[in-house]
């Protein structure tokens, strides 16, 4: 899809109501003009912000470094600094280094979603859902939740997440039922991190997704987080990164994809392959080509180490060519202490809301350098091995809209 086609079909003399990722939004002409023209200085604040509403998590997922960490909440003073910009938002995500359903601000976020007409977005296990919370979430103007399930059987779920599989899915179904008459602005999907431990439960996972009333799933690759590089042992099970995610596991996933696709179609479930789409060009007919493919896990681990130590990335040495909408559309990470980072895939710091306004941060020299690099068609060093977020990356499925309209 060319920029000119995007302009022709998505930009008019006035904002347009459109269906994106099954959510209705007002598309802003200025935002897309500035992206298409690759403006270095932008005139509006981000349409998407990831706010760390809670830091810390009471759960103990096997592959996560945040398990059973102390809980702290984003201060109201920081929310007050963001609130003047809520009218510019299409999405406010309220997850970060913590479990969002712990937040003491759920009523606040639900009310602001309605007042300012943005979609509330979060990633959660769903274990902390209650009837009261589900009823409150159902009142949001728009609601988009990714539930981290990562298993298709109670046994595998217990080893990976540590919770009660059927009890949690029952809570999720209650929320889905609450939102059944809310229309397309309320949307849910299940996430599944592919690994050796759970790959044989994928068909069960699809069946359980259907039972919960959820219509979409997304498969992702296992990320080399610090706890699992050398092995994380919990509940009598040890998860080691290179044992759980390797070419044998990926090959098995590739060869079984037709089976997953057929079952999903039968159940009325849409499959998105997320970071597993990196292997989407391979199938049983060209699996020999995949065997030559290099996963580059060491390079990604190296960047994770330098991320943590000095908030910088050094690999790849020669930045690849590419594009990303984030520096224009937004996917700012706002930490609970006010620190602001470029996006969910980069630790690149932009400033702190306790020292600067959002407008100042959104046009700071550090992000202008990123825009300049993308304007030249090259990934900046800050992006590492990230493939970028295009306009068909949820939750900004503009290209999906174009496909639906037959363009």
Image (cartoon, rainbow, N blue to C red):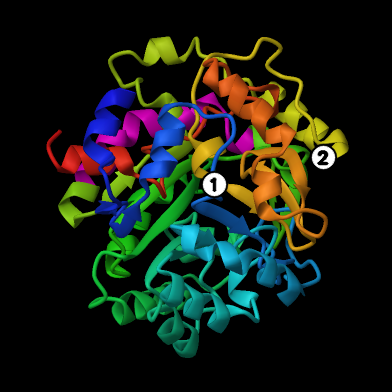
Helix, strand or loop for disc 1 = loop
Q: From the top left corner, tell me how far across and down residue 20 is, in percent.
A: 30, 51
Q: In which quarter of the image is residue 96?
A: bottom right
Find the magenta span and give its range. Answer: 243-263
The front one of 346 and 324 is: 324
Seen in the image, is 98 located left or right of residue 35?
right
Residue drawn at x 71%, y 39% is 364
**Quadrant in which the C terminus appears:** top left
Residue 194 spot, x, y in % from top left: 49, 42
Camera-nearest residue between 147 and 94: 94
Q: Is residue 73 visible?
A: no
Residue at x-position 29% and y-position 42%: 260
Image coords of residue 306 (percent x, y): 82, 31
Q: Which dot, 2 or 1, sits closer to the camera?
A: 2
Q: Is residue 349 magenta?
A: no
Q: Which residue is drawn at 76% across and 57% down?
A: 353
Q: State the residue position of label 2.
A: 308
Q: Is residue 256 magenta?
A: yes
**Disc 1 designates what residue?**
197
Question: Could you tell me residue 137's position as x and y percent?
Answer: 44, 78
**Left or right of residue 52, residue 389 in this image:** left
User: For mark 1, does the 10 Å Cα neighbourhood hold few (<14), some (14 to 19), or many (20 or more) residues?
Assistant: some
Q: Residue furthest bottom?
A: 132
Main secondary structure of the magenta stretch: helix
Q: Are marks 2 and 1 in contact (CB under 8 Å)?
A: no
Taking 407 as reference, is 269 above or below it?
A: below
Real-space Cα separation, disc 2 to disc 1, in angstroms:
28 Å
Using the image, tell me which numbered label, if any, was put on residue 371: none
Outermost residue toward the right in this view: 309
């Amino acid at each position: 899809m060319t920029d000119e086609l995007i302009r022709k079909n998505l930009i008019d003399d006035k904002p347009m109501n459109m269906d994106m990722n099954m959510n209705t939004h007002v598309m802003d002409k200025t935002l897309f003009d500035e992206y298409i023209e690759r403006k270095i200085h932008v005139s509006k604040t981000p349409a998407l912000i990831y706010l760390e509403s809670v830091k810390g998590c009471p759960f103990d997922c096997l592959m996560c470094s945040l398990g059973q960490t102390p809980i702290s909440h984003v201060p109201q003073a920081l929310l007050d600094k963001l609130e003047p910009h809520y009218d510019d938002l299409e999405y406010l995500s309220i997850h970060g280094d913590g479990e969002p359903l712990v937040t003491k601000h759920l009523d606040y976020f639900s009310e602001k979603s309605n007042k300012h007409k943005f979609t509330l977005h979060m990633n959660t296990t769903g274990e902390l859902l209650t009837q009261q919370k589900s009823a409150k979430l159902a009142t949001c103007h728009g609601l988009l939740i990714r539930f981290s399930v990562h298993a298709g059987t109670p046994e595998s779920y217990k080893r990976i997440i540590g919770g009660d599989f059927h009890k949690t899915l029952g809570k999720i179904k209650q929320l889905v039922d609450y939102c059944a008459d809310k229309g397309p602005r309320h949307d849910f999907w299940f996430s599944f991190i592919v690994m050796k431990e759970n790959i044989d439960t994928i068909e069960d996972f699809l069946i359980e997704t259907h039972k919960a009333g959820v219509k979409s799933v997304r498969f992702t690759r296992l990320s080399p987080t610090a706890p699992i590089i050398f092995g994380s042992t919990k509940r009598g099970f040890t998860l080691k990164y290179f044992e759980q995610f390797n070419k044998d596991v990926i090959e098995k996933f590739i060869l079984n994809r037709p089976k997953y696709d057929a079952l999903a179609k039968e159940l009325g479930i849409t499959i998105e392959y997320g970071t597993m789409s990196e292997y989407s060009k391979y199938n049983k007919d060209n699996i020999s080509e995949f065997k030559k493919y290099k996963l580059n896990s060491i390079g990604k681990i190296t960047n994770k180490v330098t991320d943590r130590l000095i908030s910088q990335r050094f690999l790849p040495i020669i930045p690849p060519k590419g594009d990303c909408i984030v520096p224009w559309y937004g996917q700012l990470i706002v930490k609970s202490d006010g620190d602001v980072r470029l996006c969910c895939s980069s630790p690149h710091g932009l400033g702190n809301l306790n020292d600067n306004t959002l407008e100042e941060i959104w046009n700071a020299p550090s992000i202008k350098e990123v825009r300049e690099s993308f304007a030249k068609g090259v990934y900046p060093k800050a992006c590492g091995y990230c493939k970028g977020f295009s306009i068909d990356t949820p939750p900004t499925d503009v290209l999906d809209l174009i496909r639906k309209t037959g363009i």
